[in-house]
Image (cartoon, rainbow, N blue to C red):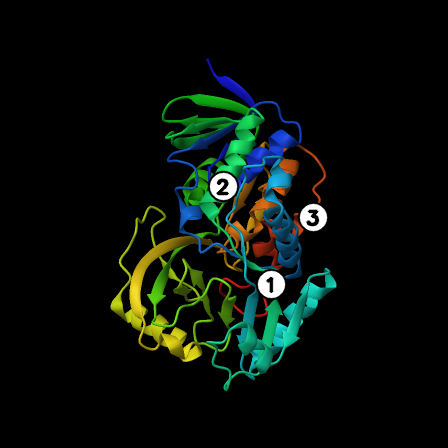
Amino acid sequence: MTEAYDLIVLGAGVIGCSTAWHAARLGAKRVLVIERNGIAEGTSSQSSGILRTHYSVPENVDLARRSYAAFAGLRDYLGDPEADCGLVVCGYLVVGDAGARSEAIRASLARQRALGIDAVEIDAAQAREILPLLRTDDLATFGYEAAAGHADPYLTATAFARAARRLGVAFHLGETVTDLAVDGARVTGVRTDRATYAAATTVCALNVWSNGLLGRATGLPIPLVAERHEVIALQAQVPYLPRYPVLKDMASPSMLYARGYGTSQLLVSAGLEGQPTSPDEQQADVSLDVVADVGAQAAHRLPAFETAGVASTWTGLYDVTPDWNPVLGPLPGWEGLVVAFGFSGHGFKLSPEVGRLLAQAALGLATDVPLAPYRYERFAEGALLAGLYGKGAVS
């Protein structure tokens, strides 16, 4: 016998868990989450966990602003006194040289301020007060967002999942979705390696694994590529203290980003396009060439790390679209289906509000924020969500 649900969510990453909780909170009575592994065991667990509202795409600024409020007050947001996302408020410092990226920094700061965010331009002396390790002699622009920081994606996802379970959401973990069930141009549910489930609406939040499933079921081209990104943790004699800000170096060749890791290490990674790869790629080796290149860029901006050692390395996958921004909402010509893919490194930052919007769309409610800018059709229309910084996980 086929089990019937109001809503099925595919994927128990941070986006899927957020969507499920929001749907139940908005009144969906029977909600099922299907995940082939465990909660947040996919790309969510690979995230660097940076929280910022600094974007050059105005729509992203708004989503990040709304999401940050949820992160900052997660216990009240979820109604769970034990909820914890591991939030560390240390600020976000974005720096640039005298080139075009400096103008992009100023424009992005203005867009943040237009939404009431405390994002200001400061001078080199102020930047060094915030981050004493910073080299500033080749920099011209400094932007600072005091309330930003980083959090733990696993803790966040499991907090949403626990709150969802308390509202009656069912989680089928270790169960693999094999196909969408369709009737004409309507998705009527899903098939897995265990059963078939019917649903009024299905939300696909499968990240890099969205291509095959959506393409097979709808016949539409899915503009999505899995990219490998390398993360390196460095240990120097001078610690990168937890109170030091997340750093974005727009003057570096790879638009480097860095943040404190643990009590003294520096987590650092490139912010440009990564290496296309299989969505099923497991942890990959980080080559010595990458370590040397990224390490040299980090040492240039933070001279205390010129003699740093490599504490650890890992890789993660981004689900990247042509404009480095997600597709959210329905697919053209299809009913009973809401999609969320192509976050391109933004997913964790935006997950509370995106989950709310997806739940609203799936339940036929008006969304708090219009999803039209994130529509699938924008690629064919030439209406890309192009950021001022070019391709990369800044937008």
Please indicate whether residue 121 sits to the left or right of residue 233 in the image.
Answer: right
C-alpha distance separating marks 1 and 2: 23 Å
Kind of residue indicated by mark 3: Pro
- Percent across and percent down for residue 16 are 51, 39
Callout 1: helix, strand or loop? Answer: loop
Q: Is residue 164 above or below residue 223?
A: above
Q: Earlier in the sequence, mark 2 or mark 3?
A: 2
Binning the other alpha carbons within 10 Å of mark 3 as few (below 14), some (14 to 19) or many (20 upward) gives few
Q: Are marks 1 and 2 in contact (CB under 8 Å)?
A: no
Callout 3: helix, strand or loop? Answer: loop
User: Is residue 204 at all visible to an observer of this figure?
Assistant: no
Q: Are marks 1 and 3 in contact (CB under 8 Å)?
A: no
Kind of residue indicated by mark 2: Ala
Binning the other alpha carbons within 10 Å of mark 2 as few (below 14), some (14 to 19) or many (20 upward) gives many
- Percent across and percent down for residue 161 are 51, 34
Q: Earlier in the sequence, mark 1 or mark 2?
A: 1
Callout 2: helix, strand or loop? Answer: helix
Q: In this figure, which residue is indicated by the disc labeled 1?
A: 55
Q: In this figure, which residue is indicated by the disc labeled 3?
A: 370
Q: Nearer the viewer, mark 1 or mark 2?
A: 2
> Measuring 57% from the left and 55% from the top, which residue is drawn there?
380
User: Is residue 201 at all visible to an observer of this figure?
Assistant: yes
Please indicate whether residue 291 sits to the left or right of residue 262 in the image.
Answer: left
Q: In this figure, which residue is indicated by the disc labeled 2?
A: 157
Q: How many marks?
A: 3
Q: Earlier in the sequence, mark 1 or mark 3?
A: 1
